[in-house]
Amino acid sequence: MPETLDAIFRPQTIAVIGASKKPETLGYKVFHNLASFGFEGAIYPVNPKAEFILGHRCYHSVLDIPGPVDQAIIIVAKEWVAEVIDQCGRKGVKGVIVISAGFREIGGEGVRREEELLAKVREYGMRMVGPNCMGVFNTDPDVRMEGTFAPTQPHPGNIGFISQSGALGAVVLELANHLKLGLSLFTSMGNKADISGNDLLEYYQRDPNTDVILMYLESLGNPRRFLNIARKVTRDKPIIVVKAGKTTAGALAATSHTGAMADLDVAIDAMFHQCGVIRVSTIEEMFTLAMAFANQPLPSGRRVAVLSNAGGPGILATDALISHTLELAEFAPETTEKLRKMLPEEASVRNPVDMISTADEEDYQAALEILLADEHVDAVLVIFVTPILVKSFDVANKLAQVIHEHPHKTVVTCLMGHEGILSGVEELEKHKIPVYRFPESAVQALAAMRRYQDVRQRDYGKIRTFPVDKPAVREIIERARSEQRTLLYDDEVRRILISYGFPLAQARAVKTVDEAVEVAREIDGPVVVKLLSKTITHKSDVGGVQVDLRSEAEVRSAVSTIIYNVQKRFPGEKIEGFLVQEMVKGGKETVLGMNQDPKSGPVLMFGLGGIYVEVLRDVSFRIAPLTDHDAREMIESLKSFPLLQGVRGEAPADIEFIIENLQRLSQLAIDFDEIGEMDINPFIVGARREDCKIVDARMVIRDS
Ligand code: ADP
Ligand code: MG
């Protein structure tokens, strides 16, 4: 329920429990911030040892405060927090912000203490931010609540920030102030015992003052919920996330191809992509984007005009545009004519426009107006390099004027140089015009805005559910578990795949060479004979796969070859038997994989390559559940996708059928989180669905 967070962000009365007179304490800093930011409601310091704090009458306990209290900010020693929360509960407080540390983050006793807090919060139906956080603020003029111990006072604005790290939160506040970026809401989440990033996203989406959401994340609590919520939020407001990227160790030890390639970071990237979240790698980049998103409209297309007073920067900007899949706008004829008339002969009036170094503020004004009027231009990048005679302040001032008069077209600016441009930069920042020091950053911001425009309009597709035989799969998994096996036998894997409606190549397991010959006779056309072993999982590595056998003699000799190859490598190895399988011809080898990541849930993989998949690494990832749209993107995003479409007269592969099978895999992964890894490799795909067959697969059950 996002409304319940009103007790956190829009309280009418706040008690600061542990408020203090001593300026060096957090209890002082929080109370001081709250009092000096001009909170619109009543604030009560609570401290048994003081009578007044900063001129406010002090209470010994929250229970002594006359009248209702909506919110309590708690900064007492960790041992007292539970009791204080209990008092708050009795007082009818609805939201608590626990700044005190010494909980889950210290392990052991701290974990237990945090559980106790959470139990009390739940018992009284309260909501809690923290513990171990830096606090919360809301700059809404009707609220004006600054409940943090940050040293900087926030500027009101339209950016909402959510931080998993208190220290980084403080840094961001300072930087935002420096860049004159205003903030609406701020939350330092701390240990997220009760209120999670997901809850906050929902609340920020509804907050009328917030247009852009920034997050600093170290971990994701419930990724599937994040996916659902973020999909809704990003339709409405952009979410820009800095997520510290960590790779999980041990990926190399995985038995499946998917396990070896899908690390946690890949999963998170996939997830952000699936819900339209913009992931950046640094705080700097986060600000680069935030500055533009917060203050400029989204460009309606990818055609960019570059306006500069020098040639070099225009070329740099052009290169950056192209590498970000933006385009140089082709001007309307009247645009070029008008520019030609106003500019000196040496100027270049084609895009990128180079007005040369004599261009002054009047020229910038006139040229920008001309470009903004051109219907072939979706966005303008204005570049200004340190001139000799022209003042950057004057140019900035004029630019700001023109930009404010055209609020519907995207403009970003770039002032290059140092001393000479400082006053210009300041002037643009003051007028909330995105201003960058390098054309590449400006282009990066434009490109992100352009991509986000697509996100808002995108169709996320549908999740399809197929009729399947769940009990059959359950039984196989339970048997394996009761036998303490993690690797499933080949016949078990095949039964699971059949239960979920996958197309399997016709095959039968046999014990002897005579049986192999008999089965081969029953199968139409050439066959393949493969080693069946409980220990050797990569069969072709040991010469255990013999393909395209066309006669009884070839089948017999294939069996002998396999026995010989295995004995040579593993003397004394017990061969369980052989799989005789129809030979699937004429298709492309693809791989469908799944890796159950303990943090993000099932990660699905699609790629081309059969036994070469790890060499080519042309694979894509998404997290389950997969919509048809996700599945299609997985396929189309491969570098080798043209191979599936058919090159040099080949018939295209049945893409729709691959999509269907990826969705079946998604369903299987969601239904059984006991399955840790799956590798369908190869799934041989042909032009018609009858020609598409799985010829090999393996599955690993997780340790329970
Ligand atoms: P493994 O992955 O254990 O080495 P596979 O069963 O995947 O064994 O076989 C390895 C390769 O042999 C496949 O990538 C494919 O090229 C070929 N192959 C295996 N079975 C068939 C089949 N039934 N039809 C066509 N080619 C096959
Ligand atoms: Mg294989």
Image (cartoon, rainbow, N blue to C red):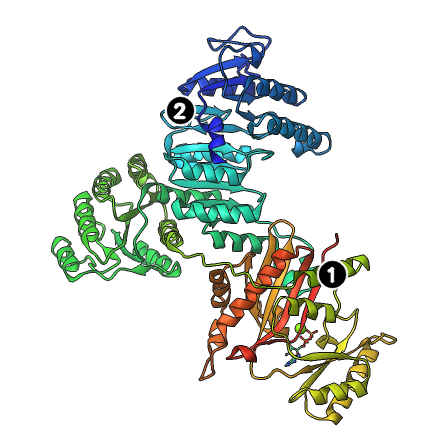
Q: Which residue is mark 1?
A: 475
Question: Residue 106 in the image: x percent, y percent?
Answer: 68, 32
Quarter-of-image position of residue 548 = bottom right
Q: Is residue 95 left or right of residue 157?
A: right
Residue lying at the far left in this picture: please name it: 341
Of residues 513 and 323, the one nearer the viewer is: 513
Q: Is residue 56 above or below residue 315?
A: above
Of residues 314 and 446, the one nearer the viewer is: 446
Q: Quadrant of ligand 1?
A: bottom right
Q: Is residue 640 left or right of residue 78?
A: left
Sequence order check, earlier mark of 1 and 2: 2
Q: Which residue is mark 2?
A: 143
> For numbered disc 2, what is the local secondary structure?
loop
Q: Is residue 401 above or below residue 504?
A: above
Question: Residue 118 in the image: x percent, y percent?
Answer: 63, 30
- Asked if disc 1 and disc 2 are in contact, CB closer than 8 Å, the reply is no
Question: Residue 606 in the image: x percent, y percent?
Answer: 56, 66
Q: Please report the residue visible at 16 percent of the width from the left and 57 percent of the height from the top.
A: 335
> For numbered disc 1, what is the local secondary structure?
helix
| Residue 149 visible, this angle | yes
Quarter-of-image position of residue 300 = bottom left
Q: Please report the residue visible at 52 percent of the width from the left and 46 percent of the height from the top.
A: 226
Q: Please report the residue visible at 46 percent of the width from the left and 80 percent of the height from the top.
A: 647
Classed neighbour count for the residue bearing mark 1: other residues with Cα under 10 Å, few (<14), some (14–19), many (≥20): few
Quarter-of-image position of residue 92 = top right
Q: Is residue 170 left or right of residue 350?
A: right
* Front disc: 1 or 2: 1
Residue lying at the far top in this picture: please name it: 51
Query: In whole angstroms, how far apart are the C-alphas of marks 1 and 2?
Result: 58 Å
